[in-house]
Structures are given as C-alpha cells and as structure tokens.
C-alpha cells in the first residue's frame, strides 16, 4: 500500500491534458451553460437586450496581398443593470506571410462597447420600438494588419419593427480615429451602420440572420474625405436555450482602419474574414 508521502508525490506530479487556450474556453462555456444559465428565453439577435454572456471561437482573415491571419477570439458582455451593459472582445492571432513588415503574433484589436437603453417596446410588431445610446472603442492590435488605429464611435440606436420577424437597428453617430499609441488624432467624421435582422421561427431553433453595412466618412485630419466601409453578415442559432452559435462574415469595402497608418506602402488591407463563435448566456 502506498505511503502518505508517496500519495503526495503522486498528486504533485499530476498534469492535466494540454488542450490549449481554445479548448479551455470551450470547457468554460459548456460548464457555464449547465451551471449558471437562466431559464429565461434568450433573443441573441437583438443588440439592445441586456444580457450577460461569454463566447469564444476561431477567426480567419484574408488580406489583399493573399496573406492571412488566424486568431482565437473571446467575446463577453456584462449586464450591469436593467438598462446598461458593457461588451468586450479580445483576440490573439498568428499571421502567415512575410511580404509586409510587422509582428507575426500578438493581440488583435481589443474592443469595448457601452450601451444604455433609454426605452424599448419588445412586444411591438410594427413601427418605432425605442432608442438606445452607445459608445464603441476598438483598439489597435499588436499583430500586423491589426495595428493601424484606435477608433471610437458614439451615438444613438433607434430601433424599428417591420413585422414580428424583421427588425432594423439604425446606429448613427460620430467617429474619431487616433494612431495606435493615441499620440496623434487622425480625424473625425460620421458613422452610419444599419443592422437588418431576420428571425424566422420555423427554420431551426434560435434561427437568425443579420446584414450590417457600415460607412464611416471622415471630414477632418489625415483621413479627411476618406471612407471606411465594410459589409457584415451573421447567421446563428442555438445548441440549447442558453448556448448559442453564430457565424460572422465581414467584407472590407474601402479604407481598412485596422491596418491604415497613413503610409501607402505600409497598408495591409483585409479582404474578408469569417468568425465562428459559441456563446453561453448566464
């Protein structure tokens, strides 16, 4: 029979299997889904709902010079109270290709978004439903292709219902851009980002489709008269009532603020990206 000392040595040399950053995040999400989630119905398609959640998944980005980046990205949201929430995103990526100078590994574009709900009629099927306010700060990353600028947008989000399955979240506001160290202000402008959401009840559990064109037009600074645009689409559903999945695609249409540094030979624009995310709501 082993002695007490032998048992202690055995325990001290035990090592858990190495499953990696993404593996541990997935285990955490599944555990949170079974241990912490509420029984209330979740509408993951509505960006004005006050929820607390945690998500993670892989993302792939393809650049204009045919280089690419892969990253593991984490998303989370804290429902502070009935009218306020704080969203964050954080990623770590690996760049493949040496045509552009810069770091091949590192943090990729952290993000913080604060949202305040002024009023909302979630039962309304047609017409104006309500209004929210938001401020969204997206930071420059360390990895090349993500290390261009810090960009902040702030404004209003009026919401409209077309019928029980179609809604529009119209994000309107101002935008400002700084270099990656916040040492230089690159310009200010306006932001328009309408999010069209279709939530059919008959396709699969939690089915939702989103289409979001975004245009940022700058009126001052280094970026004066430049346009930053992208088109985002989202398709999602649910594994369980509180464990959701979604696939987010993004196509770059003009100046890519994640990489733009004001030097034509230093730009590494993102052609498109795709992100698979699993999210647990608490």
Image (cartoon, rainbow, N blue to C red):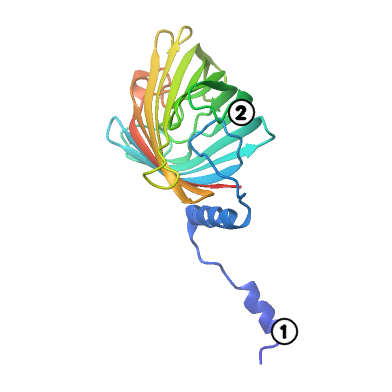
Query: Residue 257's quadrant in the figure?
Result: top left
Query: Relative to 29, is 118 on the left or the right?
Result: right
Query: Residue 61's quadrant in the figure?
Result: top left
As drawn, the label of residue 114 is 2
Query: Relative to 253, is 46 on the left or the right?
Result: right
Instruction: Return the residue nearer the eye: 122 or 44.
Output: 122
Query: Relative to 86, is 159 on the left or the right?
Result: left
Query: Residue 268's quadrant in the figure?
Result: top left
Q: Secondary structure at mark 1?
A: helix
Task: Write the residue at 46% across / 48% down.
Answer: 238
The residue furthest left is 66
The residue furthest bottom is 1
The residue under label 1 is 4
Instruction: Return the residue nearer the eye: 282 or 18.
Output: 282
Q: Position of residue 119 (x, y in %)?
A: 63, 23
> Eyeballing the image, is 7 above or below 12?
below
Q: Position of residue 41 (x, y in %)?
A: 56, 44
Please identify, in this view, whether the residue under mark 1 or under mark 2 is nearer the observer. 2
Query: Are discs 1 and 2 less than 8 Å apart at CB?
Result: no
> Eyeballing the image, is 173 above or below 248?
above
Quadrant (top left, top right, bottom left, bottom right) of the N terminus: bottom right
Q: Secondary structure at mark 2?
A: strand
Q: How many marks?
A: 2
Determine the CA span between mark 1 and mark 2.
Answer: 54 Å
Crowding near the residue tagged with mark 2, few <14, some 14–19, many ≥20 C-alpha atoms within 10 Å: some
1 or 2: tag closer to the N-terminus: 1
Task: Write the residue at 36% across / 39% down.
Answer: 274
Q: Is residue 227 visible?
A: yes
Crowding near the residue tagged with mark 1, few <14, some 14–19, many ≥20 C-alpha atoms within 10 Å: few
Q: Position of residue 43 (x, y in %)?
A: 52, 39
> Eyeballing the image, is 49 above or below 158?
below
Task: Write the residue at 60% across / 46% down.
Answer: 40
């Amino acid at each position: 029979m082993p002695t007490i000392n032998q048992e202690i040595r055995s325990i001290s040399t035990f090592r858990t299997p190495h499953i990696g950053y993404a593996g541990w995040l997935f285990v955490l999400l599944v555990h949170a889904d079974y241990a912490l989630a509420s029984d209330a119905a979740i509408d993951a398609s509505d960006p004005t709902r006050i929820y607390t959640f945690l998500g993670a998944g892989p993302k792939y980005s393809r650049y204009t010079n045919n280089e690419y980046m892969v990253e593991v990205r984490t998303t989370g949201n804290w429902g502070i109270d009935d009218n306020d929430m704080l969203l964050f995103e954080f990623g770590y990526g690996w760049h493949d290709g040496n045509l552009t100078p810069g770091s091949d590994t590192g943090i990729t574009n952290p993000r913080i978004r604060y949202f305040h709900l002024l009023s909302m009629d979630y039962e309304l099927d047609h017409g104006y439903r309500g209004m929210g306010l938001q401020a969204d700060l997206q930071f420059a990353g360390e990895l090349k292709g993500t290390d261009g600028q810090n960009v902040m947008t702030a404004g209003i989000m009026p919401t409209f219902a077309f019928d029980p399955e179609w809604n529009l979240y119209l994000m309107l506001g101002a935008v400002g851009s700084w270099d990656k160290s916040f040492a230089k202000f690159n310009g200010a402008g306006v932001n328009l980002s309408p999010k069209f959401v279709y939530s059919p009840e008959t396709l699969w559990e939690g089915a939702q489709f989103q289409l979001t064109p975004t245009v940022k037009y700058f009126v001052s600074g280094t970026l004066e008269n430049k346009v930053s645009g992208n088109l985002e689409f989202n398709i999602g559903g649910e594994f369980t009532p509180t464990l959701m999945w979604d696939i987010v695609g993004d196509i770059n249409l003009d100046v890519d603020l994640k990489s733009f540094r004001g030097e034509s030979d230093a730009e590494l624009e993102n052609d498109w990206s795709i992100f698979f995310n699993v999210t647990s709501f608490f």
